[in-house]
Amino acid sequence: MVAGDVERDLLLVGDGSRDRDKSGTEAMLLVSVWDPYIALTTVAARTDLLVGTCVALVGQHDPISLAKVIATLNVLSGGRFVLGVGHGWNREEFEDHRYSREVLRDVVREKVQLMRELWTKDVATFEGEHVRISPSCSWRTSRAPCPPVASAAWRRDWPGARSS
């Protein structure tokens, strides 16, 4: 999806999820095959576009690995990365990652908090109900303190929310 902005053009790529057609067989759109972070790194290296995820399914990723991938993309893009986070609609797919659907929102919230710790602290540590990290070196990003984080289901208590 490409959107125009008065100040800068923006390219958003989704973190595609598996989908089933009406017969119950697996189906994917071409864009869903791409890894959004590799695709966005390629675009950022060849353009001056602001790049980001329209919906990153953070709950379906290891937060430590994803934090490093995003920090790398943010540095290589010169700080032009925006992380759009969503919970995802496919509850079965979330459960494939060993969490029950009842804790979906809590898991996503904790994973974003853990990633923010890695992006903002010299030594990151996080202890949540669902995810944790022992003291670890951080990955500073080009943007201070970290890439902008927006939620598809915006709430003021979201870890990426900015106060007005």
Image (spheres, helix red, strand yellow):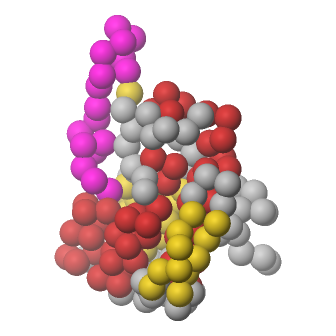
Residue 35, magenta (yes or no)? yes
Instruction: Give the farthest residue toward the top.
Output: 23
Can residue 81 be seen by looking at this rendering? yes
Residue 69, magenta (yes or no)? no
Q: Nearer the viewer, residue 58 or 134?
A: 134
The part of the image, by quadrant, that contains residue 64 is bottom left
Q: Residue sitting at 33 percent across and 78 percent down?
A: 72
Q: Position of residue 84 (x, y in %)?
A: 52, 60
Q: Is residue 67 above or below residue 136?
A: above
Q: Position of residue 158 (x, y in %)?
A: 71, 62
- Magenta region, residue range: 20-36
Can residue 5 be seen by looking at this rendering? no
Whether residue 17 sits left or right of residue 111 in the image: it is left
Q: Nearer the viewer, residue 122 or 30?
A: 122
Q: Is residue 53 above or below residue 44?
A: above
The part of the image, by quadrant, that contains residue 102 is top right
Q: Position of residue 139 (x, y in %)?
A: 42, 83
Q: Residue sitting at 45 percent across and 85 percent down?
A: 137
Q: Residue sitting at 29 percent across and 82 percent down?
A: 76
The C terminus sits in image quarter? bottom right
Whether residue 110 sits left or right of residue 47 in the image: it is right
Q: Nearer the viewer, residue 140 or 151?
A: 140
Q: Residue sitting at 42 percent across and 74 percent down?
A: 81
